Amino acid sequence: MIRLRDGRSMGFADYGPADGFVVINAHGGLSCRLDIRAAAPVAEAAGIRLISPDRPGIGLSDPSPGRTVLDWAADVEELVDRLGIERMSVLGWSMGGQYAAALGYALAARIRRVAIVAGALPLTEDGVISRLAGFDRWHTYMSLHCPALATGWFRAMSVVARSMPGQFARLSARALAPLDAEVVRNDPRDFAALTGEGLRLPAGVVEEYRAWARPWGFAPEDLEVPVDVWWGDGDRLVPKEWPSQLATRIPKSTLNIGTGGHFMAHLHYRAIFDSLAECA
């Protein structure tokens, strides 16, 4: 953990060789710094140092009410300055995709490449919220309009994940597509642990959903760094049109469609890391 200049604490995880090329991980929704832990052995083999911060109000990081996607870039800049890191790439999965894009936009001079895996379009654009997966749409709506109820819901989820990890993983797997359910079933306790940690501060999770519904502060067209857009052909949570639209709108982008569902990165970590570290 570090203390930011404004007094907030920021938690992060650090995996892989200390002298490896740095990749900053922007974790997904209902998750935390631990969601990249499964990739640690791949990172070690690829010579990648993975640094995965908790966003404000998530895991070990203090809240920052009213925050935007772009605000996170200042927090990460403080972190990498403290760690003495000058150049890096960024990986963002699911809800983390927009935060990875924010780093690519705000810290362009220090970012070699960005990977957006199963990411969404800006929710402020016409028709985007209506095309979210049902639970994400519900969580977003409740967080925006009934935050007290949403806080209670996330608190209940946290209790189940922490006290009954096996049952929590089984219930979660039932709600997922087969390819994603398989990922959860392969390590149910790890899934429950990272979700429970992500839900440590239920009010922070509400703010997380409120933040992703706010304007990014930039558009996909504004990105000037190279970006890899990844999507799994079995992903039932992200509409198949979104990755191609992102890749079309981001100037220096490459579209990669591979096997797997929403958790497709688990099948393609080495290819993602190799691309992010290219010419490092």
Image: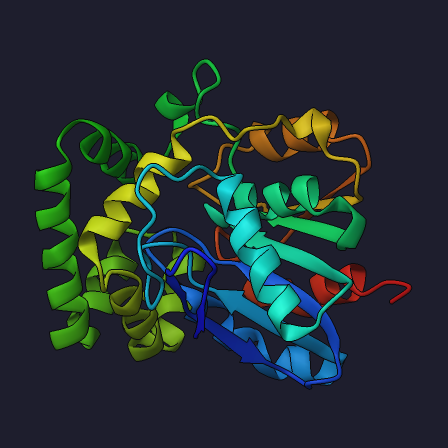
**In the shown orientation, is residue 43 left or right of residue 46?**
left
Q: How many marks?
A: 0
**In the shown orientation, is residue 33 left or right of residue 61?**
right
In this picture the colour scheme is rainbow
> Which residue is painted at 70% across and 47% down in the image?
107
> Which residue is painted at 66% across and 56% down in the image?
90
> Which residue is painted at 29% across and 74% down in the image?
193
Name the one closer to the observer, 106 or 25: 106
**In the shown orientation, is residue 208 left or right of residue 16?**
left
Q: Is residue 148 above or below residue 198?
A: above
Which quadrant holds the C terminus?
bottom right
Name the one closer to the observer, 236 or 74: 74
Name the one closer to the observer, 254 or 223: 223
Which quadrant holds the N terminus?
bottom left
Indicate the quadrant where residue 134 lies.
top left
Residue 155's spot in the image, x, y percent?
12, 57
Residue 259's spot in the image, x, y percent?
61, 54
Decide if residue 234 is in sight here.
no
Residue 204's spot in the image, x, y percent?
26, 51
> Which residue is painted at 36% across and 21% down in the image?
130
Residue 167's spot in the image, x, y percent?
16, 71
**In the shown orientation, is residue 51 left or right of residue 132?**
right
Decide if residue 195 is in sight here.
yes
Q: Is residue 103 above or below residue 43?
A: above
Indicate the quadrant where residue 209 lies.
top left
Residue furthest right in the image = 279
